Image: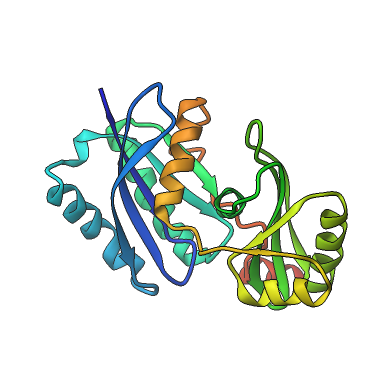
């Protein structure tokens, strides 16, 4: 019997949600539809769009068998909106949640397999970097916030060790290429990718409860930074 999965990504300037159908015992999923969400209005859009998506495909929220959500890194406000919605639904329906790092989504979206360094522009001259092993089994070796200079050094070292560098950001691709490091440029992962990875987590029993679900910010918020500097 197939299982219905709802995936949400509100980590960036724009987001999306996806409805997917998965079959226990099988790794592949069927993404029924991906709905884009305009940035800046996630809090107003998300719940009505979820209801409309379910209704369009003839389902209700009680038909959902699990959830996948992009847990970060990304926008502090956007992540809070997506996580809050998933927490509420999972708590009411008593269904499992798979938290998916956006860096994991970047790493797995490229053509390369094996060891991959995934990179995302973090703004302020910083870079979110995730070191992942994709085969034979997906494994995270670490995620860090780097300066752009540290990223170039890390990418150079990674390339010399046979790792692939993957990013959806044009600027980071240019920075690495200028340093002589080959980079695979990909499309920014959407909620369809989150659904696929979330299903892999769910199949392995890698779930979190609504109480345990937290954002993977990597960087401290402005409030935390300014609070510490004022002490």
Which image quadrant is residue 22 in?
Answer: top left
In this orientation, does residue 16 appear?
A: yes
Q: Examine the rendered structure and indicate whether residue 20 appears above or below residue 207.
A: below
| Left or right: residue 37 compared with residue 108 | left
| Count of picture labels | 0
Which residue occupies the foreground of this view, 55 or 215? 55
Query: Residue at (55%, 55%) from the top-left corner?
Result: 72
Horizontal arrangement in the rendering, residue 204 relative to residue 43 (left or right) = right
Residue 213's place in the image compared with 33, above or below, is above
- Tell me residue 71's x, y (percent): 52, 51
Identify the residue shown where x is 23% and y is 59%: 49
Residue 171 left/right relative to 141? left
Residue 185 lies, in percent from the top left, at 61, 66
Q: Is residue 209 visible?
A: no
Q: Quadrant of the N terminus?
A: top left
Q: Position of residue 192 (x, y in %)?
A: 39, 51
- The quarter of the rendered structure image containing the C terminus is bottom right
Looking at the image, is 127 positioned above or below residue 67? below
Work out whether residue 85 or residue 33 is closer to the camera in this orientation and state it. 33
Structure colour scheme:
rainbow
Q: Where residue 206 appears, x then y in whole percent?
A: 53, 30
Question: In the rendered view, would you say 172 is above or below 48?
Answer: below
């Amino acid at each position: 019997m197939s299982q219905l999965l709802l995936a949400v990504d509100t980590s960036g300037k724009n987001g999306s949600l996806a409805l997917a159908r998965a079959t226990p015992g099988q790794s592949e999923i069927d993404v029924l539809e991906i709905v884009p969400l305009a940035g800046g209005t996630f809090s107003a859009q998300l719940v009505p769009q979820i209801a409309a998506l379910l209704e369009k495909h003839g389902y209700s929220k009680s038909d959902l068998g699990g959830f996948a959500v992009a847990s970060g890194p990304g926008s502090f406000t956007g992540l809070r909106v997506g996580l809050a919605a998933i927490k509420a639904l999972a708590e009411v329906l008593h269904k499992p949640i798979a938290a998916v790092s956006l860096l994991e989504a970047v790493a797995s979206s490229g053509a390369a397999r094996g060891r991959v360094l995934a990179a995302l522009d973090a703004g302020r001259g910083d870079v979110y970097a995730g070191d992942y092993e994709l085969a034979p089994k997906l494994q995270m070796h670490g995620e860090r916030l780097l300066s752009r200079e540290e990223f170039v050094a890390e990418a150079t070292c990674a390339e010399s060790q046979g790792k692939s560098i993957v990013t959806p950001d044009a600027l980071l691709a240019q920075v690495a290429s200028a340093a002589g490091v080959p980079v695979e440029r990909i499309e920014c992962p959407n909620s369809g990718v989150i659904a696929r990875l979330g299903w892999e987590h769910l199949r392995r029993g890698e779930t979190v409860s609504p109480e345990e679900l937290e954002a993977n910010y990597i960087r401290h918020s402005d409030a935390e930074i300014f609070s510490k500097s004022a002490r």
